[in-house]
Image: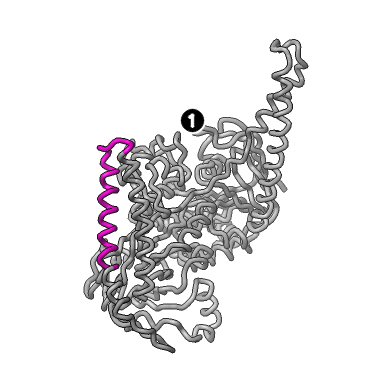
Amino acid sequence: MNYLSAENLSKSTGERWLFRNITFGLSKGDKVALVGRNGTGKTSLMDVLAGIQSAEEGTISLRREIRLGYLSQNPDLDENQTVLDILFLGESPLLQAIRTYEKALIDGSDDEIADATEQMETQKAWDYESKVKQVLGRLGVAESNFTKLVGQLSGGQRKRVALAKVLLDEPDLLILDEPTNHLDLEAIEWLENYLGTANTTLLLVTHDRYFLDRVCTEILELADGSIYRYKGNYSYFLERQSERYASEASSVDKAQNLLRKELEWMRRQPKARGTKAQYRIDAFYDLQDKASQGRRESNVELNIGMARLGSKIIELEHIRKSFGEQKIVEDFEYVFRRRERIGIVGKNGVGKSTFLDILTGEQQADSGAISVGETVRFGYYTQTEPTFRPGQRVIDVVKDIAEVVTLGSGETITASQFLQHFLFEPKRQYTDVEKLSGGEKRRLQLLQVLIKNPNFLILDEPTNDLDIQTLNVLEDYLLQFSGCIVLVSHDRYFMDRLVEHLFVFEGEGQIKDFPGNYTDYRESLSNPSTAEVSKPRPEVSKVEAPKADAAPVAPVTSKRKLSYKEQKELETLEKEIPELENKRAVLTEQMNSGEADYQQITLWSKEIEELNVLLEEKEFRWMELSE
């Protein structure tokens, strides 16, 4: 049974076409994911299907008796209603039965009360209130928020309330735009199971690859203004997508070879169009179009330099933080070490973001001491949506930080070239930031963090709104990153690939260190005996880690001591490296001043490259000696 049909849909932003003449349908029981790069028009397509926006061309047909439920990226809820009131508003038969019954109790006759009672029985509405509270709890909405006005809630809480409402309405067709954003990991697993087993028809946009694989049985890819359909889960889609790319590339190669022959024919023939075979002329121009359709499949390039990280990183001693009676951190101690990759998990509201703010100095602990090494340079990617000046262009965002950027290879490039690494083409760079899609703004926010060459990355929900291709590139970059990483993410695949151990926020200020990634942690909860396997690190809340300048302790054999000559070499390196870094910083500042001519900038750029090579050699030798 066909529920929804879209025929020859076209939608533009005014400046460019998002998609043109796309056709597809949804049948009863379909569970379909819509995927595509940021800015390709996924949210616009969802809005068009839900009737929020209109298409320039094409038609949408929804089966007459079908009820459609839509969760948008930024739900529009009445700010003057309480959370419970919002969930009791709606036109579903169940909610209508509840309202009819309540009205009959107040001023209805015995017959009206009897009819209303029968409707309640038919709709199984007696336990609706308890079901509402159960779903809200599963999605991480605290009971203390049930009677709050929607206007008092955070953006994430509003999204969870809106998701609860659309699920409780039980529509025939669910359209969900990024439903996993702002959910904690337990809530995502519950939603995954709910949607995977529910007898509902589903179209959703999500970047969560585990979620895609376990819930969806079909993939719609929106690319280059067209739609491609794949029967199968996300893993199957990746296989078939690569085959399509190869086929397209082969077709373009054949067209280009044939075009060369046809071009010779066009040049040999008389110039007057009437003397040539018109059909062959038309075919030539069609061939020319096809030959120029080479796949422009580019990825974000993350090749960012990193400032040198010294032996002392961050030491936390007896940290405490509370808000009233709610304990966030209670007597926490930890010493961060080189190349640590720590994931942070816990329910919404337990204080994960507050802990990150304490690490970076954005908030102060109530008591305890935080000692940050002199060489530590934070890169803090926050959950808060980025804000930009009205009328600010994309290129202005980068130029406000630096005119010239140093890459990991030591090469220096302009702000415009750097933006192209993040898939902002020259024409797009002069677009107002407010016209970007949500994912493009997030990509720009990531650029702002990495351009400063941090060596201690703190990433709070970096996967929200980023497309899957960008996430893959970000993962690869972070796997090669030689600094420290602290990561909060609800993307289980992302967490599993990157982290080595977890800080588990258990509530009441208790933080436990778990050795392993998120999947290991979930398995340990279902099989407690595996949780007692020998742990490489002691309990975090009671850790007695050595100071950064203390002699390292080896569990089996002691490391040899440095010779007198090696000790002097180490001392010399510790003086030379900061001097070389200062020299590089001065040269970079001179380049950014814009006061020198091209030849001088070229000389400075070459000198910076030489300094980068020298620094890399000395830092490597320093690490050998110091470790």
Q: Nearer the viewer, residue 186 or 474?
A: 474
Q: Is residue 421 magenta?
A: no
Image: 420 above or below 362: above
Compared across the picture, whether 583 is left or right of 337 comes to left
Q: Nearer the viewer, residue 92 or 273?
A: 273
Q: Is residue 574 magenta?
A: yes
Which residue is under mark 1? Answer: 14
The quadrant of the image that shows the C terminus is bottom left
Q: The residue under label 1 is which amino acid type?
A: Gly
Give the residue drawn at x 75%, y 17%: 278
User: x and y percent of residue 616 in the render?
Assistant: 38, 61
User: x and y percent of residue 378 in the render?
Assistant: 32, 60
Task: Using the rendered view, name the quadrant where residue 189 is placed.
Answer: bottom right
Task: Using the rendered view, name the quadrant where residue 24 is placed.
Answer: top right
Density class for disc 1 (Cα within 10 Å; few <14, some 14-19, many ≥20) is: few
Compared across the picture, whether 119 is left or right of 480 comes to right
- Residue 145 visible in this rendered orientation of the protein: no
Compared across the picture, whether 417 is left or right of 262 comes to left
User: x and y percent of residue 393 in the render?
Assistant: 36, 37
Give the residue drawn at x 40%, y 40%: 416
Give the extent of the magenta segment: 573-599
